[in-house]
Amino acid sequence: LDNVSATSGASYGFYQLTNANGVQFKNNIISITRGGTGLKYGIYRSSSTLPLACDYNDVYVMSAGSGSQYFGYQGTALSTITDWRLATTLDSNSVAMDPTFASPSTGDYKPTSSTLDNLGTPLGVNVDIDNTARSITNPDMGAYEFGSIVPVTLKSISAGIVKQNVLLKWITAAEVNLDRFEIERSIKGSGFEKIGSVRSVASGTSYQFEDLEIVNKVTEGSIVYYRLKMADKDGKFKYSPVVNVRISKVKMIASVYPNPFKNRLLLKLDALKSGSGSILITDLTGRILISQLKVIIAEGSNNLVIGQLNNLSKGTYLLKLVYNAETLVFEIVKD
């Protein structure tokens, strides 16, 4: 549901009102980004007594309009996926992330967010809508099975304020056949637009891009969102995690190392003023694995040690630093 010009009327991704046995709602993608003042619900269930097996779904509700929006409803409106799980005990394996459809304006609703890859559950459906073979053990959510993934590994990505402009910085760990990074920006968190491009150089390169136009496009205090579209020479692409920054005089530029890591990380942070923040480590679906609910950040240079990471299995994770309404996201790898 993506008509940003919509003006009114409630929207429902899944709507259950009457009693029917054997209802299963699995391996689906719901995306509600339409405009308007009407209420938006990802999943609407009028009563907890209605039979429903609901899990392994992606439910993304990020309306461009002014109406209230909720992940779900069961007797009362439930804002987040966590609220929904606690109230219903459903969707323990579901996620709430932007599927980033390839081209909705032309009817191409293939999800391109690589973090959704292999998150479905086997249901006996052997091919997708294009007759592409489904994975027998880890199929994908939605109508399409993911194809090959662009051969690039992103070590970190961050956004911060430098002289009222936004400086986007990222580092790669591996680049094979990569052509370019396209920088995309969104004022509202959905509806990204391309604002620039940087050519691929080599694995391990530190890149940066400065958004010189943003100061004239938004007001003080606005939150702006950025992501990278990483495209290879064969036309395949994938997106980076989304980072955001509040347009203000606060400067926050950070880096994390070593990456890959073994048992601990060092987060280096430059801040224009002191304050408190929080650090989270999540898996690629957003599930929180480690949290430091409060860290004290001093004005100037900071070295934040994140230790006791022995219990993390080898693999890729996201490290998130939240400070003064800004969020930096780093893709980290446990070796």
Image (tube, rainbow, N blue to C red):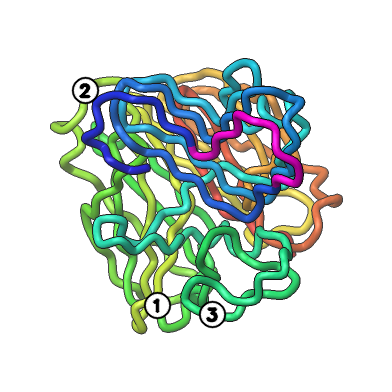
Q: Position of residue 288 (x, y in %)?
A: 70, 39
Q: Given this view, does label 3 or label 1 mark the residue nearer the observer?
A: 3
Amino acid, disc 1:
Leu
Q: Residue 111 appears in which quarter of the rendering?
A: bottom left
Q: Residues within 10 Å of mark 3 (few under 14, many from 20)?
A: few
* Residue with the mark numbered 3: 132
254, 283: nearer the viewer: 283
Q: Residues within 10 Å of mark 2 (few under 14, many from 20)?
A: few
Residue in the picture at 86% in, 50% down: 311
Quick one: SS at disc 2?
A: loop
Mainly helix, strand or loop, the magenta region? loop
Q: Earlier in the sequence, mark 3 or mark 1?
A: 3
Q: Given this view, does label 3 or label 2 mark the residue nearer the observer?
A: 3
Residue in the picture at 26% in, 37% down: 4
User: Which quadrant holds the N terminus?
Assistant: top left
Q: Position of residue 58 (x, y in %)?
A: 57, 47
Q: Read off the magenta span.
A: 13-23
Confirm whether the magenta stretch covers residue 270: no
Q: Position of residue 143 (x, y in %)?
A: 51, 63
Quick one: SS at disc 1?
A: strand
13, 172: nearer the viewer: 13
Residue in the picture at 59% in, 76% down: 127
Q: Which label sits on residue 178?
A: 1
**Is residue 22 in view from this perspective?**
yes
Query: Left or right: 251 with respect to 16?
Result: left
